Image (tube, coloured by chain):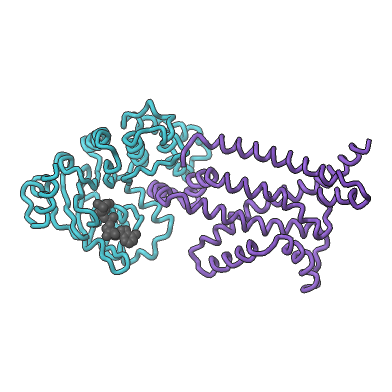
Amino acid sequence: MIFWGVTLNLLSGFETTLLIFGLTLLFALPLGLLVAFGAMSKFKPLRSIVKIFVWIIRGSPLMLQIIIVYYVPGFMFGAPITTRFVAVIIAFVINYACYFSEIYRGGIESIAHSQSEAGQVLGMTKGQIFFRVVLLQVIKRIIPPMSNEIITLVKDTALARVIMVVELIMEAERFSNSGMIWPLFYTMVFYLLFVGILTLLFGFIEKKLNYFRA
Amino acid sequence: MALLEVQNITKRFGTDEVLRNVSFSLAEGETLAVIGSSGSGKTTLLRCLNFLERPDTGCISIRGEVIYDAAVSQSYNDSYIQQNRLHFGLVFQSFHLFPQYTALQNITLAPELLAQKRPDYGANKKRILHEIQQEGLHILDQVGLSAKCGFYPHQLSGGQQQRVAIARALALKPDILCFDEPTSALDPELTGEVLKIIRELAQKNTTMIIVTHEMRFAYQVADQVLFMDEGLVVEHGSPQAVFDNPSNERTKRFLERYFSDE
Ligand SMILES: Nc1ncnc2c1ncn2[C@@H]1O[C@H](COP(=O)(O)OP(=O)(O)OP(=O)(O)O)[C@@H](O)[C@H]1O
Ligand SMILES: [Mg+2]
């Protein structure tokens, strides 16, 4: 059966796609929060540096950033990143942390300062106020923009092939290079199924947080 | 000795002097009503007492012990402020309940977090949390809302939300409970239930500072009335002295305006 053979091949490419997706989320979600705190810091030099960095990352193509992360350390410092996959992860994490940071910042700044003051007069510490009062309200507010960004990430994983990391599309291209074109179209099913599952998941979380208004 | 002593508090925003040499003292169990027109500095005064603003000059003492001295205020760190603001409770004009917690959880959250600092917390965690829970229910009952303990803020009326906010402040047993226009954000038919709770607190000799535009209520409940204008304490005395025999022109004009509206 050619179909099953192709499917198995594509699944191995899809595994790489999922790995890029998963690792990027794992590192970029917390890193983005740190970047957001930097962008909101009371210490102006830090704030400026972080804002310029976010501008550079958001202002240039992710494809270019992947190439830079892979080639520049070798050219400039004689310290090449040896595996292509690691370079892809580094580029994706930095890029997505910057996008997430802006979503976090918008979310945090949209929670009225009065919530923090209410916590303060009750003797709570800054950490307690953030984690016990503000955070869940922020999460509720940022679920829609976050789901957008995360769904974009699913499709951005295809950029990994610029440095020859064999993800789903590149896997399919191996077939098209030898004259078999349908596996390339078949990849669409993988993306659509995965995004479909994510959409259901976000809908579920949104519903879970519907018990309060913020 | 006075429970609270406020001496020569001045607060500036830029060059704008919002509080000027405000002084007063309050004995245990007394109720002080603060009145004055919009922008006279009433909210700022309460915010200074609760360490949400730092006065530029002056001292605040509790039972004779200075807890805030503007001259050395730079040296106060976060934990000092956290500790000392527990002398005061503050009920905001628009409640500011935590939306993701039920009425009961709004009340127990801060006591639970504070309890974590107790040395016996690790050993007696279960019992301590249970006690806090019981105490929370008890306070909720005091404000007449035990039936609503599992309700979230958006499921409560404005008056009920404000009563939960009062309960939340009471749960920490502050020495002095401050109210910033507690009924101003409420529909007129809901102010009564909140004023009733405050009246009951006064009868139980809770020490309170109440910023209010409800003159009749201030007259009935307060032991002292303080009239502020442009950051100055213009008149200060018993309700009878301030309302019935104001000595200052500005007080007279303010009160006339009020009672002609009614
Ligand atoms: N953070 C701030 N920065 C600058 N000015 C402020 C700030 N907070 C208050 N003010 C100013 O201080 C003055 C007193 O304000 P405050 O809120 O204490 O008045 P108030 O007596 O509570 O008035 P109201 O009856 O309207 O609530 C106002 O002129 C206000 O504009
Ligand atoms: Mg005010």
- Residue B47 picture location, percent across and down: 32, 54
Say above or below: B124 vs A124. above
The chain whose colour is purple is: A
The percent coordinates of residue B51 (x first, y second) are 35, 55
Q: Is residue A174 left or right of residue B38?
A: right
Q: Is residue A190 left or right of residue B206?
A: right
Residue at image point 51% right, 60% down: A40
Q: For this view, does A105 lie left or right of residue B10?
A: right
Residue at the location (34% across, 58% down)?
Answer: B53
| Of B43 and A204, the residue lying toward us | A204
Residue at image coords 31%, 64%: B13
Is residue B228 at least partly visible in the picture?
Answer: yes
Tell me the cyan chain. B
Q: Is residue A92 above or below residue B120?
A: below
Nearer to me, A113 or B186: B186
Q: Is residue B150 above or below residue B119?
A: above
For the C terminus of chain B, the quadrant is top left
Report the number of numbered marks: 0
Q: Quadrant of ligand 1?
A: bottom left
Please tell me which residue is depicted at 53% across the width and 40% down the height of the picture: B122
Residue B74, relative to residue A152: is it above or below?
below
